[in-house]
Image (tube, rainbow, N blue to C red):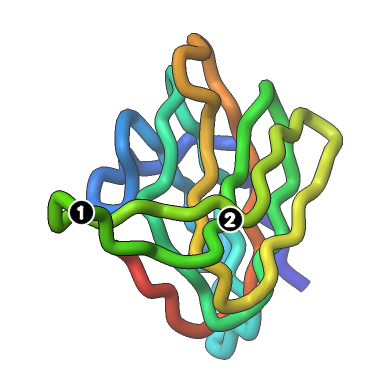
Amino acid sequence: MEKITFFTEGETETEYAIGKVTMNKVSDRFKVQKKELKTYFVTFHDGARTRLHYHDSDQILIAIEGEGMVEIFKKIEAAQDGKYQLVVEDSTNFKDGETVLIPAGKLHWHGGITGQKGKFSHIAILKNGSTVWF
């Protein structure tokens, strides 16, 4: 059995985030060779959030500090000006002590609440597999 401390902010993430996001890849810190789960401790600063993405497995988000949000989208529709418009399927805020399940294959983003100062932290757990980023 291995034991680690993961309530540290980790590295600043720029490729998969909008705004300042720090991420600690908890599952990468274990010495076990085969990992079936990916686990992250993520902190969103001042309303930052992830970029739009989806996973090939369910994802569980456990709020640890502050209040954040998740938006799931049904589809992307082409607008008249040639740009695309996201159509929201579901949206929720959640705070420390609350947990959200995002189903596999659902286009979404999550993070801090726009305009909110301070931190929002959550633990993200999902099966090892692929994530598609936009």
Residue 81 in the figure: left or right of residue 121: left
Q: Residue at x 49, y 10 (%)?
A: 117
Query: Camera-side residue: 88 or 41?
Result: 88
Residue 92 in the figure: left or right of residue 27: right
Q: Residue at x 55, y 51 (%)?
A: 88
Query: Camera-side residue: 17 or 82?
Result: 82
Instruction: Answer whether residue 127 is visible to the viewer in this image.
Output: no
Q: Residue at x 14, y 50 (%)?
A: 81
Q: Secondary structure at mark 1?
A: loop
Residue 1 in the figure: left or right of residue 49: right
For disc 2, the marked residue is 72
Is the C terminus in the top left, top right, bottom left or bottom right quadrant? bottom left
Q: Is residue 72 above or below residue 20?
A: below
Instruction: Answer whether residue 64 is visible to the viewer in this image.
Output: yes
Q: Is residue 22 above or below residue 125?
A: above
Q: Position of residue 10 (x, y in %)?
A: 43, 41
Question: Dot 2 surroundings within 10 Å: few (below 14), some, or many (20 or more)?
Answer: many
Outermost residue on the front side: it is: 80
Using the numbered discs, state the Cα–Cα distance from disc 1 to disc 2 in whole angstroms. 23 Å
Outermost residue on the top side: it is: 117
Is the N terminus in the top left, top right, bottom left or bottom right quadrant? bottom right
Quarter location, residue 92: top right
Q: Is residue 42 above or below residue 133?
A: above
Q: Earlier in the sequence, mark 1 or mark 2?
A: 2
Question: Dot 1 surroundings within 10 Å: few (below 14), some, or many (20 or more)?
Answer: few
Quarter location, residue 132: bottom left
What amino acid type should be assigned to the residue bearing mark 1? Answer: Gln
Q: Position of residue 119 (x, y in %)?
A: 54, 20
What amino acid type should be assigned to the residue bearing mark 2? Answer: Ile
Q: Position of residue 57 (x, y in %)?
A: 62, 80
Q: Residue at x 41, y 30 (%)?
A: 48
Q: Which mark is residue 80?
A: 1
